[in-house]
């Protein structure tokens, strides 16, 4: 009997025949990534329902020497969950493993299985009177296993950290099918190597995360939101330091929005309107939060912004006066990606540099790009508080973009060289997947690549875990 | 020529003969640990002055097949920096590598070499108008490389995290002498495996940390400190949740002090006096901090404590009315270890459980110990906010302790079994070193030990890095 057939029979015996999908109509959604840039194939899509089934599936694949591609909500932006084209791997869908196993409000933790959507985790926290602070546009679809495997970020990293910082423990099915139970809900544990760190952000190349102990926080009961026109990126950086110095951890968002980004939103998103009389060259969305219900945050923010006007950093400011106005300001920021999509093609980057180097990056990248494409349109926006910008490039006339697309590699080299020269990163929050593999090898030192490969070989000696991703 | 002699000559040629110590008078302080529980020997104590010298020293040792024991301020509590007794290793002192390489206030980072004392790092941060929040009793002597290698904790982990959370990047000399430059000052970087996590908390068994990018924070400008008598550990846990819910991240310390711990301080520390009329069975030291200078923290804390009295969690409270009173309250907590030392012998533990399980731990451990030693004296105190307690045991009459000491293994088994049953850890913040190696093997699963050994073998195939520690 053919090896693949034998494997699929063994998998069907493990999870049930109806959980081993092979019909094209069933498997299709799993084989293409969300942005429709990658398409692959697999022997089957397998849907284990619990960690025991998952472990048996992985063991069977390991014994058959068949590669595994883990997939959560399939909302990744770098093709990290799309199988290779050869069709010889098994796609492992974690979506059925979607139980909240436990909530411990006194310990500020919950245990979620990999297939829980981010929204389900947020809701479980809320029901316990707590906050799970990770928040992403895709939260209704993306799953915790994917959030962990890509070390997801978002708009509240400034205050709460990335997914890595939100995780206390993991349960992982190793490449040989053994289960590592590291589901500890401890704030302090210095007993040897912190193994969970290996799997977070590894994009499924070292094992399959099946569950996690996640940190919860007090719910904010007071918030203040303002939209500011700042005199430039350097003023924005100065204001960030000034704000943190005055309001500390109340600062929960500090987002930069360039003129082109805001104009896209105003053009394409129904109901969007400029919060200030003129569209600023550089806007900031600032949010303060406090669990203390009597916190007079509007007053605090107003006072600090008054001082910031005096320093010349801020030109104009609109403070949201109601929940509806807060939502309106946030929508302007959150709809940039959607407006970009409607507008059409762009060469996109997800970069970070030290916060202090953001002004240098913006100046250097614009100058270098304009030297080649004088009319290039730069849509720059993102998490200035983390030094992380999304930086999208296109030409104003759609017909010129056809030629521009063919220059993607050159554009990437210009942008990424500048980032690299500023000790930055070519992937701040989206990961590597298939999309940035070549760039990773281009920019990482030989020593670092050797270390990564040594770890990969140590944990996955057969090289069966999500092949063709990251390394 | 003898291999060892040849190696020492090569090392002398690298760092200078005066930086290769071999005279007993010179090497003695390096060969004994701070608590004087371990004593070893080494071929020499080598003191490189920069990362190039360090790398050449490590390479020479690797080529000679000679083991390396890295040492910082030699203040560790588990013998992790004391060389083996065989005298065949080289002790690598990092203390001369003590430069602050850079401070970037706008990025809230500084770069410190491994040999900087913690106090020097705190001072460099302060000079830049920032806070480096790690704070330890040994901060004048302990060094950043040691803090990183043991993932140091302390009283402010609740708010700022362990050393791991305070670190953005590392420079590491690998076991073969190559230098990994991971000195990135980025809040977000998702380009492959997060290699720095491997070396933090690895106690020098995977490589030698030579420098780090550390996170800085706004300086607190307002503080409030109170000493509370609570009705018991369960009330303390309830109060913790209530406080966080009301004051959020302003809560910077939440320390539990059992009656015996406070009585030791009152007995042995000159000038110490009880903050409340009676010595409570369970005391809490609570600290709020805020960078906002006008924060009316005393009022906020007073109001919340008033409510806590209403809930029955708090019996009595003393709010510090001056800087001097704050220092006095803190001294009561910080002098517990010193008072314990003066009092005499104790079998000590450094455990953590989920915060919600602290009451269970205290009840179960006391019952199990009293079943064997009805008069055992329990000195319990520590970082309740992190679920981390120091738990010291002795018998009231000094002459009985001689026999009690011989039962250390039995005592450990009782305490650690209870911790393990509550999903806790046998080493919350002190690490493993030599002291807890056997306990680590006893309590870790085979899968976890296998994973740790796979990592060790991948990075240090010759097994030359700090042998006999951790694994």
Image (tube, coloured by chain):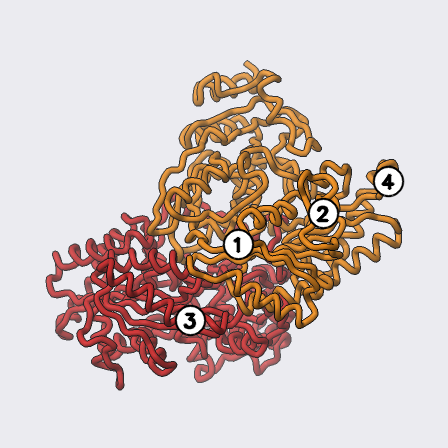
Chain colours: A orange, B red
Query: What is the spatial separation of the Cα atoms under label 2 and label 3, in whole angstroms?
Result: 44 Å
Q: Are marks 4 and 2 in contact (CB under 8 Å)?
A: no
Q: Residues within 10 Å of mark 1 (few under 14, many from 20)?
A: many
Label 1 – label 3 distance at C-alpha: 28 Å
Please say if A268 is above or below B422. Answer: above
For label 2, the SS is loop
Q: Is residue B327 above or below residue A366?
A: below
Instruction: Give B97 or B11, whichever is nearer the viewer.
Output: B97
Q: Position of residue B130 (x, y in %)?
A: 55, 72
**Which of the two residues, A266 or B395, is positioned nearer the viewer here?**
A266
Name the quadrant of the N terminus of chain B: bottom right
First in sequence: mark 1 vs mark 4 = 1
Residue A73 in percent (x, y) is at 55, 33
Give the chain of mark 4: A
Q: Looking at the image, is mark 4 or mark 2 nearer the viewer?
A: 4
Chain letter belonging to callout 2: A
Question: Residue B224: x, y in percent?
Answer: 38, 72
Q: Circle 2 is placed at which residue position?
A: A349
Query: Going from the N terminus, do you reach mark 4 or mark 2 first?
Result: 2
Which residue is denoted by mark 1 in the rendering?
A161
Secondary element at tag 4:
loop
**Any mark on residue A397, and which?**
4
Give the Cα distance between marks 1 and 4. Answer: 39 Å
Q: How far apart, in angstroms, are the residues tagged by discs 3 and 4?
A: 57 Å
Q: Residue at x 39, y 62 (%)?
A: B429
Helix, strand or loop under label 3: loop
Chain letter of disc 3 in the image: B
Q: CA distance from mark 4 to mark 2?
A: 20 Å
- Mark 2 or mark 1: name the one nearer the start of the chain: 1
Q: Disc 3 vs disc 4: which is toward the camera?
A: 3
For mark 3, what is the residue?
B296
């Amino acid at each position: 009997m053919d090896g693949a057939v034998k494997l699929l029979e063994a998998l069907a015996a493990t999870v049930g025949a109806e959980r081993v999908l092979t019909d094209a109509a069933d498997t299709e959604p799993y084989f293409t990534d969300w942005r429709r840039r990658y398409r692959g194939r697999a022997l089957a899509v397998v849907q284990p329902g619990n960690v025991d089934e998952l472990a048996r599936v992985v063991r069977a694949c390991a014994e058959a020497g068949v590669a595994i591609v883990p997939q959560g909500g399939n909302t990744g932006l770098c093709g990290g969950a799309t199988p290779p084209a050869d069709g010889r791997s098994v796609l492992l869908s974690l979506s059925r493993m979607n139980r909240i196993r436990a909530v411990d409000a006194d310990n500020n933790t919950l245990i979620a299985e990999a297939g829980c959507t981010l929204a389900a985790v947020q809701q479980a926290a809320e029901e316990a009177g707590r906050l799970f602070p990770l928040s992403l546009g895709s939260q209704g679809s993306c799953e915790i296993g994917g959030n962990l495997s890509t070390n997801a970020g978002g708009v509240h990293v400034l205050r709460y950290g990335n997914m890595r910082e939100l995780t206390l423990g993991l349960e992982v099915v190793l490449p040989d099918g053994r289960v590592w139970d590291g589901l500890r809900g401890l704030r302090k544990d210095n007993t040897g190597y912190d193994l969970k760190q290996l799997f977070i952000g590894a994009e499924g190349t070292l094992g399959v995360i099946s569950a996690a102990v996640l940190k919860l926080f007090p719910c904010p009961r007071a918030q203040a939101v303002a939209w500011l026109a700042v005199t430039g990126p350097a003023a924005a950086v100065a204001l960030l330091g000034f704000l943190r110095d005055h309001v500390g951890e109340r600062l929960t968002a500090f987002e930069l929005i360039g003129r082109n980004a805001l104009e896209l939103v105003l053009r394409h998103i129904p109901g969007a309107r400029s919060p200030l009389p003129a569209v600023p060259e550089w806007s900031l969305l600032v949010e303060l939060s406090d669990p203390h219900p009597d916190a007079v945050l509007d007053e605090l923010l107003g006072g600090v912004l008054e001082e910031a006007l005096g320093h010349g950093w801020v030109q104009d400011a609109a403070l949201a006066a109601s929940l509806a106005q807060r939502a309106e300001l946030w929508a302007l920021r959150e709809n940039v990606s959607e407006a970009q999509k409607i507008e059409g093609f762009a060469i996109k980057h997800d970069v970070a540099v030290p916060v202090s180097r953001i002004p240098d990056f913006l100046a250097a990248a614009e100058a270098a790009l304009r030297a080649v494409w004088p009319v290039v349109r730069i849509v720059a926006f993102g998490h200035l508080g983390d030094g992380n910008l999304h930086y999208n490039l296109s030409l104003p006339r759609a017909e010129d973009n056809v030629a521009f697309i063919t220059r993607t590699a050159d554009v990437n080299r210009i942008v990424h060289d500048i980032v690299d020269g500023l000790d930055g990163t070519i992937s701040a929050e989206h990961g590597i997947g298939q999309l940035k593999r070549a760039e990773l090898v281009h920019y990482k030192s030989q020593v670092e690549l050797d270390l990564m490969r040594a770890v990969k070989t140590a944990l996955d000696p057969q090289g069966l875990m999500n092949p063709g991703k990251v390394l």
